[in-house]
Amino acid sequence: MSLDKSVGLTSQFTKDNFLNLVLSGLIALSTLFSLTIHRWLGIDFFICVAISIFVLFRSKKEDVDVSRLSPLFIVTFCSPCIAILVSQTIRMEWSFPYYDSPIRFMMAIPIFLMILRKNLAIGKILSYSVPLTPIITLLVVPFLPKEGWGIEPTRLGTYFVDPLTFGWVMLCFGLLSLFTWKMNPQRSKKLSTVFTLGGFFTGVYLSIASGSRTGWLALPVVLLILVVDFLPKGKKMKYSALALTIVMVLTIALYQYSNTVKERVDIAASEINSYQMHAVNIDNSVGMRLSFARMGYYLFTLRPLSGFGDHDFKERINDPFPSSFTTQGTRDFPLTAGFHNEFTTNMVRSGIWGLMSTALLFFVPLGIFIYGLKKTICPEIALFGFAFVVCELISGMSTEVFNLKFTATLYAFMMAVLCGTVIKAIRQSRHHATE
């Protein structure tokens, strides 16, 4: 090999290493201050998108053999914008602000394609960044400006993140911390345990301190997934009753020894028990959400193809059917704050297209992770991604998890990285099988 070629290879190797380091740093830093520094996640995301586009332009076409799952992922992440465009076209009214959050999914596609081309240690990155996110949040919160949502006297939030969002995001990161224990085998088990348990307990504490019950059902569900994963291979079905018992004991213990959890769960149970299907219900947290779901389905039947947008259903909220079980306050609430359900909000906004788009965003990544687990391909990342989607899906049943630019960016960023990593591993395993 000539000296010029050797120097060229060394230069290229250095550039690639530097680029990998920058991208790894952006992924690691993305969540650390996402709930404590306004626009932190967004800025990090935009920089990562720009670098990813640069990587794609300088890559040769043959650098990556695109998996059959890749087009499915791309269509899925284009679907929110397509749903809005189609529904607005049918209504013959266009508004660009509707695309603020959905465009984040399209913007994440270059990151996904970049992950397919680069060899990044995603497991190692997440093993540090995910547990550190709730820990850093706990340390930083006392020093944040006492304004906006940060002045709630009894519920923890930050100046730009409301307690409801703050609660479910922190619970999600707390639960995900447990799944990072096996992601970095080079780290000592003692250090891994400190990181995972520290992130878990901090995340759960912050969620409880927020006073929001959104996403709490994910706690026993995700813990069950984790316990089943730790059971001996080949004997998971045999020990499934043991796993369920362990999770039930942990959940009951949390209920018994946390006054906040006990109080909030008891209130929720009382509100469910008092809800009436054929009479006007008083305004309370759970009762209003049940009414929102019924209102949303009614409105969807009126405009299944075009939807109403965010406010055009105002003329129909006082129709006889919604008026028969809701107060005026409950009927007015979705006009400014949505239906507190990701599926309901999008099917009222964009009709069947919004409903399909929402289903794709949840279930396509879920299917990718399940496939990875079934084939034992990249199992740690696949299980982590599976748990992440479960947390978001359960939270999405009682609030909008993609409606805010911040939360849409978080999900889009994480899914691009995780699905890209799993699909890359699937593609590589197929190549090895054919060799």
Image (spheres, helix red, strand yellow):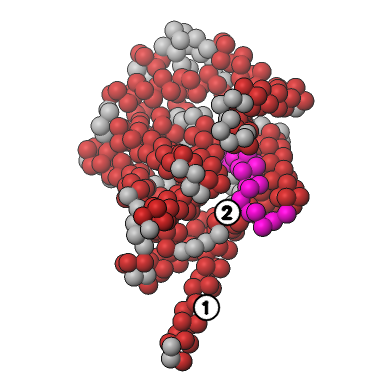
User: What x and y, as percent, mark residue 294?
Assistant: 41, 19
Q: Residue at x 50, y 23 (%)?
A: 289
Question: Which amino acid is tagged 2?
Answer: Gly
Quadrant of image for the N terminus: bottom left
Q: Residues within 10 Å of mark 1 (few under 14, many from 20)?
A: few
Question: Which amino acid is tagged 1?
Answer: Thr
User: Element type at marker 1?
Assistant: helix
**Label at residue 14:** 1
Name the quadrant containing residue 227: top right
User: Element type at marker 2?
Assistant: helix
Nearer to me, 78 or 165: 78
Nearer to me, 233 or 274: 233
Q: Which residue is mark 2?
A: 123
Q: Is residue 166 left or right of residue 20?
A: right
Q: Residue at x 53, y 72 (%)?
A: 17
Segment colored magenta: 164-188
User: What x and y, as percent, mark residue 166?
Assistant: 61, 41
Nearer to me, 4 or 338: 4
Q: Is residue 171 magenta?
A: yes
Q: Residue at x 52, y 67 (%)?
A: 20
Residue 329 drawn above or below residue 361: above
Name the quadrant containing residue 129: bottom right
Q: Earlier in the sequence, mark 2 or mark 1?
A: 1
User: What x and y, as percent, mark residue 98?
Assistant: 37, 45
